[in-house]
Image (cartoon, coloured by chain):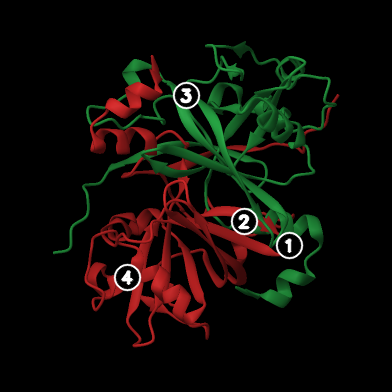
Chain colours: A red, B green
Amino acid sequence: MIFKQTDLAKMPQRYRAHFINSLSGFKSANLIGSVNHAGITNLSVVSSVVHLGADPALLGFINRPHTVARDTLDNIYATGYFSVNHIGQDFFQQAHQASARYPAEISEFSAVGLTEQYTGLPCPYVAQSAIKLGLQFKQKIDIELNHTVMIIGQIVEVIVPENSIEADGKVGIETQNSVCVSGLDEYHTTHSLGRLAYAKAT
Amino acid sequence: MIFKQTDLAKMPQRYRAHFINSLSGFKSANLIGSVNHAGITNLSVVSSVVHLGADPALLGFINRPHTVARDTLDNIYATGYFSVNHIGQDFFQQAHQASARYPAEISEFSAVGLTEQYTGLPCPYVAQSAIKLGLQFKQKIDIELNHTVMIIGQIVEVIVPENSIEADGKVGIETQNSVCVSGLDEYHTTHSLGRLAYAKAT
């Protein structure tokens, strides 16, 4: 079945949102942790975290400036730091609840029942998360085409279970029960098909 | 186990690449299809496709300008179009092989045994892929921090099986056997935990 641009334009807004959000493939499922100068913590569910490079270790994520995640952006600009926490199979429902529009004075941590954890950086980690990253804010890139922004951070701290690290450095995120997401609201566990050798032209 | 920035800096390059590439979470697994003016087609494996917005329907992906995927960039700049094709469980090994460094005059389609499909756009689709998107190139954003680029395209064509579309517009990409990837080389099928209701503050 083929949909052309005019077919996409005719879709009702909500239908199109579900449809288009499914098309990029499976997405990472993360909670972004941040805090404001008054000490009120914030969590937002983000499915757009993308690897930018390993040296320096950079991640980006996409955000609309004026949606639920606005507190996140304000906090990141104010403190210069944020955390990225993998959503795990055993708390994905609580994590999803953090996508609700809570007022700025309510911390999603207490609202959804997740636990703050600190190491010294000015951003809260999610204690329930097996894999947690602390990032220093580096750059905001405005995407004029649709008024979104890409926030780029450098990984300055990584918290992972020691037994998750394979001999060559790969972290077994499946063994840590990290989940992925498709579309706006479907969560998935994974089953490994195995690792493939570095591909060479033959 | 906590790794600080200095620990990351001390890692051997290949070890750090495996480590850092695992940290963003599960990634979409796509083949980008393109063609040059001489008619030579190209496929590259991309795990950084990210949803940017539904209206207009925009996707982005991250690329290093001078790696194996350089042909892809040259083709996109030349023709203004590219395709995004979900990697499926039944051909993920062939797809991975497309990441090898073939010379520009060799098409990855024939090198790895995948089939070109056309609808009229100046970019080849992968016939074996259940979910295929045709995109018009919109913008290149230079990420100065590490000399990568984000390529942004607008979805102008969507090819999906009719029975994959749910009543509210969501596409069941798990039912179509799309896979995801972790780190540089591990592929995964998925198992749905279900869809969650739109979260509301209570």
Q: Secondary structure at mark 3?
A: loop
Residue shown at 65%/25% (left/top)? B79
The chain identifier of the residue carrying mark 4 reads A
Looking at the image, is mark 3 or mark 2 nearer the viewer?
A: 3
> Which residue bears the numbered disc 2?
A171
Determine the CA span between mark 2 and mark 1.
Answer: 17 Å
Around disc 1, counting alpha carbons within 10 Å, would you say few (fewer than 14), some (14 to 19), or many (20 or more)? some
Amino acid at circle 2? Val
Q: Residues within 10 Å of mark 4 (few under 14, many from 20)?
A: some
Above or below residue B29? Residue B41 is: above
Tell me how far mark 1 sits from mark 4, CA to CA.
Answer: 32 Å
Contact (Cβ within 8 Å) of mark 4 with mark 3: no
Residue B112 picture quarter: top right
- Name the residue located 35 percent from the left edge and 66 percent from the top edge: A70
From mark 1 to mark 3, how far is it between C-alphas? 33 Å
Q: Which residue is mark 4?
A: A114
